[in-house]
Image (cartoon, helix red, strand yellow):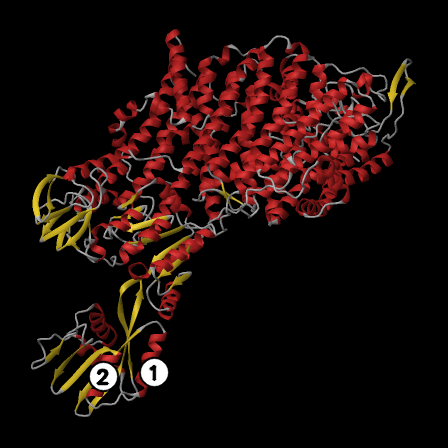
């Protein structure tokens, strides 16, 4: 079988699996977030944290809860790392330096999982399992909670209420992420992913010398790393490491885990706003962009010219032979179009265009299908912008799902789309203008520029994947990327919740023949076009000087 | 003839919309005091708007005046262009030998100027109108009544509640209501209609407007508005744009444009350190970056946005509708329920004879003959319609009263409710059922049993029955029944179908009983009706619709309509109506034509569509500009980027200059579209979106590729550039 055919078949298998999971998972999540009942375990948690899960919150209260919870998370994770040296079960690793501890704390709470450390050489069992893995669950649940709150804003009520943050958070963990993680971890272990608490082993190397290997609760962390679109690997090599991702099948399963919740949330959205077809329209937009990017990636990686490439059947540098170009390309697109950032190959080694596709995927705001929750709310904000422009073209004050898009809504949506470009381009520009940050680049020319552009793109968009080729463990990068991650995560959430609050206060406008039909293919096309033009054009000059210059040269 | 009339005639060549004037020409409004249908013929279409290139020249001084930064800052997009122009000017002055710097500078200034020009042209059209109005507002002397005595005071000193006297030849000194007397008034100063109208105390025709002229008789007027706030003052402010405030939707769009400007500002500012690193420092001078920025930010829509708004109001003024706020015009586009008065809007306003039905033993022709004979002395519209029907349907020549010698005519009066004639020993009568039955029974005649059945059937079908009776040698008897019907205006059904496709529900309001109302509603094809409607019912209906999130539009003229007019999202008061109604509504129709509501909705939609279309066009344009400017800036540093020069532009300078020139010229090219508005036809939202996306989205993507290439080819002909 040719590698191209293998890649296409893997893609088809993936699509089939996602399609199978779409309806049951989407409907299940809709029930979870609409249900009035609490599980016993949940009641214990509410009692422990002193929350009343039945009280309805307005957007300000919802936001307060979210920010307080996340701030506590950052602080806890920071202290845990700083005290690692004194904690038991740390495999003898030292405490983490302040700048790196801040960066890592920000990174995991912001669902980014940018790692400026090497997992197996810095973090012990306690930090990995009690700190990082816990944040993998809760930061993902926070993302879904915000998306659900925004969806409730579209509901045909006029209460201004968005649900209860604590209930959404706890349900996300207990009823959605945990059960799937248990099942997923079993599958991964069956595939050969490690799951133990063993110490460090000195292993003899093939060409002489020794190498340190350590085990750990890898499978359980691996599953939530992908399912929660977190991406922080147990090992530095992330999903390229055979202990994390041993076989082509585990690879495909990991991609499935990355995409399953973000896609299914469109079904949840459709259910909760009372129109499955509205959910399909959003799904279609996400799927179109995702498939387009995957096709382009496979094309550029397979068709890369030159004698060495021809021999290898494409651009194999930096890719694992057990995944091949197909399995690597599908993974790379899935991880950059969601906020995952797990990698199974070296992104820096992709072709010029390949690197560009990865960066553009993140720069679109990670909305196709995007991070758990964040993908849906990001896409809905873009839908509001698209509806505004298109709505004018049908001669009515624009409305989406019966809610009018007025001054306040546009103001908030505009703020939302301003945040990440400001962070990405701003920090990249300052880094390029200063002299020291450039010392971290391991390449010169366009590729060197791509390394820094990628780092901030990944941080501000909460992706967390690294291009590689950048020594990011410096005071400058730890601090600025840490800030980019926090601001890139929580500022948009502020705007989204404010938007949800504003929508929730509106009486819906009844649908007539004069209403823009947002469940039609025409709208899907328009939405995709708006995303590509408005977000894509922002980064065009920067991309031209990095991946485009590189890609067009070959 | 006033300027209004002239303007209308000038607009006439634009009347290209099929079915133009379908609504407006069909009939006159019920208010017969406003004759002069000559202005009506070419209306009823949306999209009219005169654009004369000479206006550009005339508005040039205004365009320069608007360069004032305090004015420019109101449009964030154009303000950025202004700053860019100033920066490049400074740079060009510092390096006077750099032709490229000067060229960019000149074109950036032109971009700014073109934007101002667009606004100035839009405003200029209103100014001409305001000047005419001002002439009408000459200083008047009021004859104020104080304690029965008259005193002369300047019109500006009148207070609300003052009583003033006006006689033939006087200019009415202020807005008010006639409290005594009847007069004919020349209102051409505001309506453009030269024929006088009747104003009388009491009822719905009591309002008079300051600045209009009394032609006959004497009236006493109670002043209802303060000087300076009169209708004519407000009109001047409105058409001049002085009172223009940004509408909610315009503000929202401005925010979106401002944020796009910020995004692109970010993209351009951060480009400098990237370029220095890439080794393209020289190719990304401040001048080039300013040019790139101006090309990327949505200047096309930014430049035309306020012109679109002003032109929208102006299109209403051309149709003799005054919108008291831009908000109302926007709301008109959103309306989902139209309340339409039956009389005058849906029906012709008069009942007309539709058929003659004989009772058993009589023929139709006999009834027709008797009906015609008995109606010759009936000058009411109903009476005339009987004569006309007899002539058209039964070929009965109209006889004149003088032809029949010895005939004794019985004229129709409101008391007898009958008319007829006594001739050759025959007495013919026609009239209201009760009256005719009484007449027959008085004469010992018998009323045929089926006569009652026939009248009942007609009543139930929503018509009005009249009886025809004859007394001759055979005694008195009923011959038959005349069926009077409310006649629905031609083309109304199609019009309502169109509205339904646009998603607008029509509700007919009538004082008729439910049976009659239903019959007419079915015939006209309205979606719903409100029968035996009282002002309270109307109000309740509006509130009910609004509670469901719908926007409601209605027309009204009476004082008792005022609360409903105020409650409706779009309340169009008839100019013939009372001052209370005019105060309460947010629009006034100077023609007092209720059908115009439909046009107002279309104009509101057209306003929004024009904004959306030009925004889409403006954003889509960016793609081509990138392909022109990015390779021009970076092909030296990274030769591979020359592959992006897909337009094969001749040189980097020419590429950048071509993009800037295209960006400036497209504004001028689109001024006519901004002023006229995008062509609008009622269709479903889906079809409309597909069409506009195709024209303005795809068009916006493709047009600049062609435009920039053409400009580049022309530029390369200039020695020293290509």
Does residue B645 lie above or below B252 as drawn? above
Quarter of the image holding residue A363? Answer: top right
- Give the quadrant of the N terminus of chain B: top left
- Give the quadrant of the C terminus of chain B: top left
Frontmost of labels 1 and 2 is 2
Q: Residue at x 81, y 34 (%)?
A: A250
Q: Which mark is residue A313?
A: none
Chain assignment, label 1: B
Instruction: Give the side of residue B586 with respect to residue A164, left or right.
Output: left
Residue pointed to by mark 2: B438
x then y, percent, for residue B552: 40, 51
x then y, percent, for residue B509: 35, 60
Badges 1 and 2, same chain: yes
Q: Which mark is residue B453?
A: 1
x then y, percent, for residue B187: 17, 48
How many other residues sit within 10 Å of disc 2, few (<14), some (14-19) or many (≥20)? few
Instruction: Give the side of residue B203 with respect to residue B666, left or right.
Output: left
How many other residues sit within 10 Å of disc 1, few (<14), some (14-19) or many (≥20)? few
Number of numbered markers:
2
Q: Point out the tag, 1 or 2, that comes first from the N-terminus.
A: 2
Q: Residue at x 21, y 68 (%)?
A: B381
């Amino acid at each position: 079988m040719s590698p191209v055919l293998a890649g296409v078949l893997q893609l088809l298998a993936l699509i089939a699996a996602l399609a199978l999971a779409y309806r049951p998972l989407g409907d299940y999540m809709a029930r979870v977030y609409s249900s009035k009942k609490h599980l016993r375990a949940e009641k214990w948690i509410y009692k422990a944290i002193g929350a009343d899960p039945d009280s309805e919150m307005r957007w300000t209260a919802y936001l307060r809860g979210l920010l307080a919870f996340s701030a506590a998370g950052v602080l806890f994770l920071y202290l845990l790392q700083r005290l690692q040296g004194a904690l038991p079960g740390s495999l003898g690793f030292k405490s983490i330096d302040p700048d790196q501890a801040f960066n890592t704390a920000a990174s995991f709470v912001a669902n980014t999982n940018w790692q400026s450390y090497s997992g197996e050489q810095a973090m012990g069992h306690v930090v990995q399992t009690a700190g990082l893995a816990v944040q993998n669950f809760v930061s993902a649940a926070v993302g879904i909670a915000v998306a659900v709150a925004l969806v409730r804003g579209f509901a045909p009520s006029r209460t201004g209420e968005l649900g209860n943050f604590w209930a959404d958070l706890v349900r996300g963990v207990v009823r959605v992420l945990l059960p799937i993680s248990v099942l997923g971890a079993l599958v991964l272990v069956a595939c050969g992913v490690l799951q133990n608490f063993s110490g460090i082993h000195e292993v003899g190397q093939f060409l002489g010398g020794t190498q340190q290997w350590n085990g750990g609760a890898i499978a359980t962390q691996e599953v939530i790393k992908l399912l929660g679109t977190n991406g922080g690997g147990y090992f530095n090599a992330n999903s390229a490491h055979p202990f994390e991702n041993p076989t082509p099948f585990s690879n495909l399963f990991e991609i499935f885990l990355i995409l399953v919740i973000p896609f299914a949330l469109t079904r949840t959205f459709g259910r909760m706003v009372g129109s499955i077809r509205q959910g399909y329209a959003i799904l279609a937009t996400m799927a179109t962009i995702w498939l387009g990017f995957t096709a382009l990636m496979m094309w550029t990686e397979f068709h890369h010219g030159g004698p060495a490439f021809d021999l290898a059947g494409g651009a194999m540098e930096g890719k694992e032979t057990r995944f091949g170009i197909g399995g690597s390309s599908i993974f790379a697109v899935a991880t950059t179009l969601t906020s995952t950032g797990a990698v199974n190959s070296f992104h820096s080694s992709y072709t010029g265009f390949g690197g560009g596709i990865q960066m553009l995927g993140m720069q679109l705001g990670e909305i196709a299908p995007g991070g758990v929750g964040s993908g849906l709310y990001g896409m809905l904000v873009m839908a509001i912008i698209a509806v505004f422009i298109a709505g004018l073209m049908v001669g009515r004050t624009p409305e989406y799902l019966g809610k009018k898009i007025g001054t306040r809504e546009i103001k908030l949506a505009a703020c939302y789309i301003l945040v990440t470009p400001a962070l990405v381009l701003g920090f990249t520009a300052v880094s390029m203008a200063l002299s020291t940050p450039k010392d971290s680049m391991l390449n010169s020319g366009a590729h060197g520029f791509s390394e820094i552009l990628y780092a901030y793109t990944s941080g501000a968009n909460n992706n967390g994947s690294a291009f590689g080729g950048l020594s990011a463990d410096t005071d400058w990068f730890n601090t600025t990327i840490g800030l980019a991650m926090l601001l890139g995560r929580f500022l948009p959430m502020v705007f989204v919740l404010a938007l949800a609050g504003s929508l929730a206060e509106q009486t819906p406008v009844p649908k007539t023949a004069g209403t823009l039909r947002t469940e039609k293919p025409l709208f899907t096309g328009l939405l995709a076009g708006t995303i590509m033009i408005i977000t894509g054009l922002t980064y065009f000059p920067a991309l031209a000087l990095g991946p485009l210059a590189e890609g067009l040269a070959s | 003839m006033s300027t209004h009339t002239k303007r209308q005639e000038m607009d006439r060549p634009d009347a290209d919309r099929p079915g133009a004037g379908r609504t407006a020409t069909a009939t006159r409004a019920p208010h017969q005091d406003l004759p002069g249908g000559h202005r009506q013929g070419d209306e009823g279409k949306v999209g009219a708007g005169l654009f004369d290139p000479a206006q550009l020249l005339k508005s040039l001084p205004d365009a320069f005046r608007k360069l004032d930064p305090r004015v420019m800052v109101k449009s964030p997009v154009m303000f950025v262009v202004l700053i860019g122009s100033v920066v490049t000017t400074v740079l060009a002055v510092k390096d006077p030998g750099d032709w490229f710097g000067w060229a960019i500078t000149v074109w950036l200034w032109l971009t700014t100027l073109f934007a101002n020009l667009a606004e100035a042209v839009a405003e200029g059209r209103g100014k001409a109108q305001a000047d005419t109005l001002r002439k009408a507002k000459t200083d008047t002397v009021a004859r104020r009544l104080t304690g029965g005595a008259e005193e002369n005071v300047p019109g500006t000193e009148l207070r609300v509640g003052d009583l003033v006297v006006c006689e033939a030849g006087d200019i009415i000194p202020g807005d008010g209501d006639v409290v005594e007397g009847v007069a004919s008034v020349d209102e051409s100063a505001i309506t453009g209609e030269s024929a006088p109208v009747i104003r009388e105390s009491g009822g719905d025709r009591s309002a008079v407007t300051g600045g209009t002229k009394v032609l006959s008789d004497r009236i006493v007027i109670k002043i209802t508005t303060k000087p300076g706030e009169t209708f004519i003052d407000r009109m001047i402010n409105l058409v001049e744009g002085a009172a223009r405030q940004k509408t909610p939707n315009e503000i929202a769009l401005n925010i979106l444009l401002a944020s796009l400007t910020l995004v692109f500002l970010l993209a351009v500012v951060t480009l400098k350190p990237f370029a220095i690193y890439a080794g393209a420092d020289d190719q990304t001078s401040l001048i080039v970056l300013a040019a790139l920025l101006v090309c990327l930010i949505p200047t096309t829509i930014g430049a035309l946005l306020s012109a679109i708004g002003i032109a929208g109001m102006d299109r209403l003024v051309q149709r003799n509708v005054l919108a008291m706020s831009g908000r109302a015009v926007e709301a008109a586009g959103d309306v989902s329920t139209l309340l339409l008065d039956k009389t005058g809007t849906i029906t012709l306003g008069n009942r007309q004879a539709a058929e003659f039905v004989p009772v058993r033993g009589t023929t139709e022709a006999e009834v027709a003959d008797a009906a015609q004979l008995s109606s010759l002395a009936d000058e009411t519209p109903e009476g005339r319609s009987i004569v006309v029907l007899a002539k058209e349907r039964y070929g009965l020549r109209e006889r004149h009263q003088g032809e029949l010698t010895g005939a004794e005519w019985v004229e129709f009066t409101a008391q007898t409710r009958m008319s007829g004639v006594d001739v050759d020993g025959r007495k013919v009568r026609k009239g209201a059922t009760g009256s005719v039955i009484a007449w027959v029974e008085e004469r010992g005649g018998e009323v045929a049993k089926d006569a009652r059945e026939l009248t009942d059937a007609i009543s139930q079908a929503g018509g009005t029955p009249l009886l025809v009776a004859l007394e001759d040698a055979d005694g008195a008897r009923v011959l038959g029944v005349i069926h009077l019907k409310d006649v629905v205006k031609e083309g109304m059904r199609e019009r309502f179908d169109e509205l339904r496709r646009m998603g607008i529900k029509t509700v007919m309001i009538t004082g008729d009983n439910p049976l009659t109302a239903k019959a007419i509603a079915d015939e006209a094809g309205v979606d719903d009706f409100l029968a035996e409607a009282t002002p309270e019912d109307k109000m309740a209906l509006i509130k009910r619709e609004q509670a469901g999130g719908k926007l409601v539009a209605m027309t009204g003229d009476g004082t008792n309509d005022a609360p409903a007019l105020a409650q409706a999202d779009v309340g169009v008061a008839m100019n013939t109506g009372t001052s209370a109604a005019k105060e309460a509504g947010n629009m006034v129709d100077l023609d007092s034509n209720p059908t115009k509501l439909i046009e107002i909705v279309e104009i509101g939609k057209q306003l929004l569509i024009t904004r959306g279309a030009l925004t889409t066009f403006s954003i889509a344009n960016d793609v081509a500009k990138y392909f022109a400017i990015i390779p021009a800036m970076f092909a030296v540093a990274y030769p591979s980027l020359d592959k992006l020069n897909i337009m094969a532009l001749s040189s980097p300078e020419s590429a950048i200059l071509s993009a800037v020139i295209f960006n400036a010229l497209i504004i001028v090219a689109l001024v006519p579209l901004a002023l006229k508005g995008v062509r609008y036809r009622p269709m479903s939202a889906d079809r409309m979106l597909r069409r506009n996306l195709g024209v303005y989205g795809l068009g916006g993507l493709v047009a600049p590729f062609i435009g920039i290439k053409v400009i580049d080819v022309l530029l390369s002909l200039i020695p020293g550039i290509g």
